[in-house]
Image (tube, coloured by chain):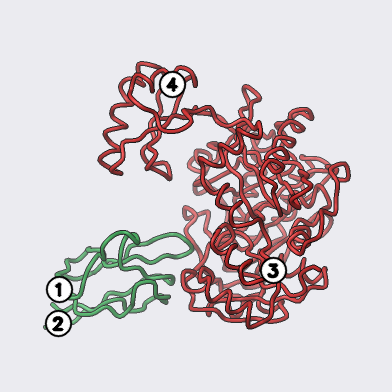
Amino acid sequence: MGITKLLIANRGEIAVRIIRAAKEMGIRTVQVHSAADAGSLAVEMADEAIEIGPPPASKSYLNIAAVLDAARQSGADGIHPGYGFLAENADFADAVEAAGIAFVGPTGDMIRAMGDKASARRAAQKAGVPTVPGSNGVIGDLAEAARSADEIGYPVMIKATAGGGGRGIRVAENARDFANLAPQAAAEAKSAFGDGGLYLEKLIARARHIEVQILGDGTNFVHCFERECSLQRRRQKVWEEAPSMALSDSMRNDLCMSAVALAQAVGYRGAGTVEYLYDDETGAFYFIEMNTRIQVEHPVTECVTGLDLVAEMIAIAGGKPLSVRQEDIQLRGHAIEVRINAEDPANNFAPFPGIVDGFRTPGGPGVRFDHMLYDGYQIPPFYDSLLGKLIVTADDRPAAITRLKRAVGELRTGGLKTTAPLFLALAEDADVQAGNYHTKWLEPWLAEHAGTFSDEEGT
Amino acid sequence: MAKSEIRSPLPGVFYRRPSPEEKNYKEVGDDVKAGDVVGLVEVMKTYTEVKSDADGKLTAFLAEDEDAIMPGQVIAELES
């Protein structure tokens, strides 16, 4: 019973994180890697390492056959996919299970059900979880569409079913706007995507991004409270915290219990995150999507609950029941995580695949640094820019922000440019200190403050 | 006939087309003008165009689609 040898089908800081959890559980580790990652910290730390292909991820970390070969060759009885790469690839999950190996995550079918926006939305509605008011599918003629828009309430977004990534979206402020914009949107969608299908969604103008961590073993389901991740640049989170400062206790309870209801309704297995938009003005929350994997920002939850989410998901995949009941999970203190990326904030966040020199890690009370760095490490240019996450925990949010400034100030990476100066500037900002922001807050702030980030360490 | 080379200024993954569904920017034998895009380099999920500095006829690609490349590596050769 239980996994005895775990293959890590990922790289970077999350591979290091998974190896640490496995070691503490007495599980042997096999790190697969590309040719570019032979000298990585994860390869150094794992019990075994197997090269699975050349540097581009499409030929290594995304090569399902190569990962399965490595699992067979090493005798691994479990595979942890981390986040990104194959973590939400349902065919991969199926192939792993078909090979008689435990996949550390939900079943392929559950990944499919949650990966499809329409089916995830239906599942949420069925479980009684509020979704963003919308047309529930493709709208018919323009008269029906106008009626639907009235019901949803303005402003509404008119979206092309065949669009994506923000393409083909128009915003109507009122019925007159709508009458003008809807025919244009249909014509544009038809010419751009060959499909004129449209659907409608209420525009939540100043929304916070709040997400709930859940755990399930297929029979029992718990939440581990929420994370607020409203500070985003190009839809990428840069600063995450737990708990959210926007929620009252009763609102927190409603939000978290709705995530449990969804997990229960689908019989969820593993660690998952239910993401919501939260409207400050009305106090309403709306389901956006569910992520069926461990998230980058999971440590803030670990810091305020004392749980080890990665160990928990490995145990569940090995067939063990949840180790905690809901009443065992208590919120204590406040945690903030910032993402240390190899990007130059003084140069519009250009990627910076440099060399770490004169490395010094932050430490001391309430500081955790999950990272992939060592002195002399050459950052490979082939993968995303995340180097690590600096997490601070304190009794309350003001103390956490003070501690964050102290900890960021201790980090040294020499000539390697990172996003660290951004967080020193954010920590000094009055709106950030007041927790007064939404998902569209950071980009204008960055435009206004461009060129003010000091890249001198220790200032 | 003068030969010239198109080099990548950056390390990363080289692509010959703007996206997997689209055609290659250039094929061997194509005419190339200074400033024409011949490929993309992906550095940490950020894409940068690789452009020719010279006019000429493209005679060879020295990097394949999805190859890992180093800064200064020759991507293609031109004859003018």
C-alpha gap between disc 1 and disc 4: 56 Å
Mark 1 falls on what kind of element?
strand
Residue mark closest to the camera, 3 vs 2: 3
Chain of the residue on which disc 3 is drawn:
A
**Picture coordinates of residue B49 (x, y %)?**
33, 62
Residue A140 or residue A80, whichever sits in front: A140
Q: Which amino acid does label 4 sit on?
A: Ala
Task: Check disc 4 and report the residue beneath it.
Answer: A149
- In the figure, the shade used to draw chain A is red
C-alpha gap between disc 3 and disc 2: 51 Å
Task: Check disc 2 and report the residue beneath it.
Answer: B2
- In the figure, the shade used to draw chain B is green
Q: Which of marks 3 and 4 is nearer the N terminus?
A: 3
* Residue drawn at (74%, 75%) of the image: A5
Q: Which amino acid does label 3 sit on?
A: Val
Q: Which label number is shown at residue A264?
A: none
The image quadrant of residue A86 is bottom right
Mark 2 falls on what kind of element?
loop
Q: Which label number is shown at residue A16?
A: 3
Using the image, determine if residue B64 lies above or below residue A441. below
Residue mark closest to the camera, 2 vs 1: 1
